């Protein structure tokens, strides 16, 4: 399989960025095989970059891997882009994939912004390992999962790791309702157009820095 288009730096999956390269090198130091590199990168992106659905907006910087890395926070789309960028930097072909998901565990404030529990264009990463594409979702960091009472998504480099189907209490947490395919780079224009139609309140909300603290809201729910 020709994976050339999934190896190069792009506008949003900017694997050539100096900070992205340094991040990948630090995370994979001392490991020599692609599976081990992929695991190190997955957990570094999952837990060192906080999931923050309020740190989002129309600006292209909110979707770019390197900007997500420098901010140390972001929602699912830039975190998936960051894992893809770091993987490419480490020599692993990578691309981003998307699906619409119904999230049954959220916070009141976020649901008010989105108008419901359907989240479109939920991002994940696909890594080319041992001759096949494997899906990984680095969005939800460990500390946030603990606040929500959700088992963190693990990744072994060989099996798809896509969604938190149930929380620790056995209640349904997330389900995919539509697949949107995979891409060599973030399809920014299409996503923005769909977000504006689906989430008009989200775009009209105050600046990301004052929207709220998602982790504190999650803990306050006592889930």
Image (cartoon, helix red, strand yellow):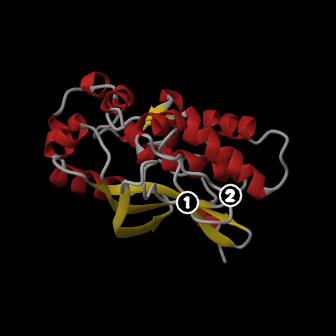
Determine crowd level at label 1: few under 14, some 14-19, many 20+ residues with C-alpha closer than 10 A.
Answer: some
Question: Residue 186, can we see it?
Answer: no
- Element assignment for label 2: loop
Residue 177: x, y in percent? 32, 68
- Residue that protrudes farthest toward the top in the picture: 210
User: Do labels 1 and 2 touch, CB within 8 Å?
Assistant: yes
Residue 186: x, y in percent? 43, 55
- Element assignment for label 1: loop
Looking at the image, residue 125 sits to the left or right of residue 92; the answer is left
Q: Is residue 15 above or below residue 164?
A: above
Which of the two discs, 1 and 2, labels the residue nearer the N terminus? 2
Looking at the image, residue 44 sits to the left or right of residue 13; the answer is right
Residue 3: mark in rendering: none
Q: Is residue 156 above or below residue 54?
A: below
Determine crowd level at label 2: few under 14, some 14-19, many 20+ residues with C-alpha closer than 10 A.
Answer: some
Please give the residue where the numbered disc 2 appears in the rendered image: 156
Looking at the image, residue 63 sits to the left or right of residue 151; the answer is left
Q: Residue at x 51, y 47 (%)?
A: 151
Looking at the image, residue 116 sits to the left or right of residue 55; the answer is left
Q: Residue at x 37, y 69 (%)?
A: 179
Spatial distance from mark 1 to mark 2, Cα to Cα? Answer: 8 Å
Q: Residue at x 58, y 33 (%)?
A: 48
Residue 197: x, y in percent? 16, 54
Tell me where residue 123 sits by quadrant. bottom left
Q: Residue at x 71, y 73 (%)?
A: 131
Please give the residue where the numbered disc 1 appears in the rendered image: 161
- Judge by depth and name the residue closer to the eye, 221 or 76: 221
Tell me where residue 122 sits by quadrant. bottom left
Q: Quadrant of the C terminus?
A: top left
Residue 124: x, y in percent? 48, 56
Q: Quadrant of the N terminus?
A: bottom right
């Amino acid at each position: 399989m020709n994976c050339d288009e999934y190896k190069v730096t792009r506008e949003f999956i900017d694997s050539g960025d100096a900070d992205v390269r340094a991040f990948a090198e630090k995370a994979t130091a001392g490991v020599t095989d692609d599976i081990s590199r992929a695991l190190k990168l997955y957990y570094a992106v999952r837990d060192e970059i906080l999931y923050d659905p309020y740190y989002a907006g129309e600006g292209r910087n909110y979707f770019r891997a390197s900007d997500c890395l420098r901010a140390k926070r972001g929602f699912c789309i830039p975190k998936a882009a960051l894992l893809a960028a770091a993987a490419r930097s480490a020599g692993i072909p990578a691309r981003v994939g998307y699906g619409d998901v119904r999230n049954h565990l959220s916070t009141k404030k976020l649901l008010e912004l989105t108008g419901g529990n359907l989240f479109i264009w939920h991002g994940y990463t696909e890594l080319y390992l041992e001759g096949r594409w494997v899906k990984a979702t680095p969005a939800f960091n460990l500390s946030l999962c603990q606040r929500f009472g959700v088992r963190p998504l693990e990744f072994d480099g060989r099996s798809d790791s896509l969604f938190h189907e149930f929380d620790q209490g056995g209640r349904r947490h997330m389900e995919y309702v539509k697949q949107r395919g995979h891409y060599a780079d973030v399809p920014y224009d299409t996503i923005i157009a769909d977000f504006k139609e689906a989430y008009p309140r989200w775009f009209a909300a105050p600046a990301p820095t004052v929207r709220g603290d998602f982790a504190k809201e999650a803990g306050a729910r006592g889930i």
